[in-house]
Image: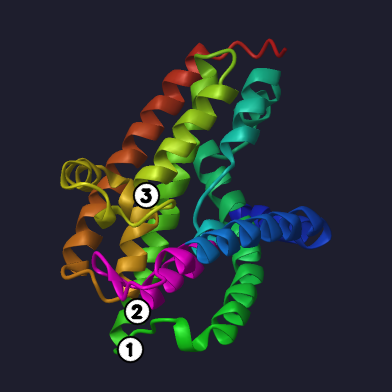
Amino acid sequence: MQKYWTVFRVNWQNALQYRGPTFISILGNLLHISVLLYLWNAIYLGNQQMGNYKLSDLITYYILQLMINSMVLSYISWEIGNQISEGTFSNFLVKPLNPLHYWFVINLSGKLFEGLMMLVVAGIISFILINHVTLPSEGITLVYFVVALILAGILAFEFDFAIGILAFWLVQINSFKYMLQYGMFFLAGALLPLDLFPEAFQRIANLLPFRFMLYFPIQIFLEKERQPIEGFMTAGIWIIALYLILQFGLKRGIKHYEAVGK
């Protein structure tokens, strides 16, 4: 564990030193959410409720989405893919590090730093819109929400890592990564709450694990999730299954790896 703690500490220091890109990313997400809030405010003019959501519910939904985007959703696949295609992934073959565990620690330290910054931004927005935000009525809801965030972060990392190691078999994966990532975010409920879609789409989304990355934690916070414990168990099964698949895929990928670079 000492070596991974060192990796965590070094990457945290790098994040502190190069905080400009993180700040720009937060501004971009803030602009995106501001447009969505303005849009939904216009849609709700004359309407008290849409589906299962009051306007305050949707405002809370998108504020939480802003926070979860920074704290949970992972983008390390870009760096993993570049290292594999450029041949620098060979460094892992001579170090006593498991690449999956190494990148998990790298992702964790970066997300904690970015999440703390976004938590401040989300807090300021919530304070400004305090009369238009839905807050939990019970303390246990916040506990469930934190547990859901932890599970969401692990799942999001595993899927992003899976996209990254596709570079072992595919020469160019950038466009493929865009397609997969946007598909995952859509099915996670990043664009619209999943229960506002047609019922057939909801059934498909509920069979997939992507909803646990965003929609499920927000539903818990809004106290609309009736069976959080069952959801935790399902997410846990997905996490264990994906971990085993990734370890297997990593071993096969390393055997296929030629380290020739671009």
Residue 38 on image: x %, y %? 54, 65
Quadrant, the N terminus: bottom right
Q: Residue at x 41, y 71 (%)?
A: 45
- Say if residue 5 shows up in the picture: no
Q: Is residue 258 above or below residue 162?
A: above
Residue 235 on image: x %, y %? 27, 54
Mark 1 in CB contact with mark 2 (< 8 angstroms): yes
Quadrant, the C terminus: top right
Q: Is residue 38 above or below residue 74?
A: below
Q: Is residue 63 magenta?
A: yes
Callout in the foreground (3, 2): 3
Residue identifier under label 3: 188
Mark 1 residue element: helix
Callout in the foreground (1, 3): 3
Answer with mark 1 or mark 3, whichever residue precedes in sequence.
1
At label 1, the amino acid type is Gly
Mark 2 residue element: helix
Q: Is residue 25 above or below residue 173?
A: below
Residue identifier under label 2: 143
Relative to the observer, which residue lies in front, 16 or 213? 213
Residue identifier under label 1: 139
Q: Quadrant of residue 231?
A: bottom left
Answer with mark 3 or mark 2, whichever residue precedes in sequence.
2
The magenta region covers 40-67
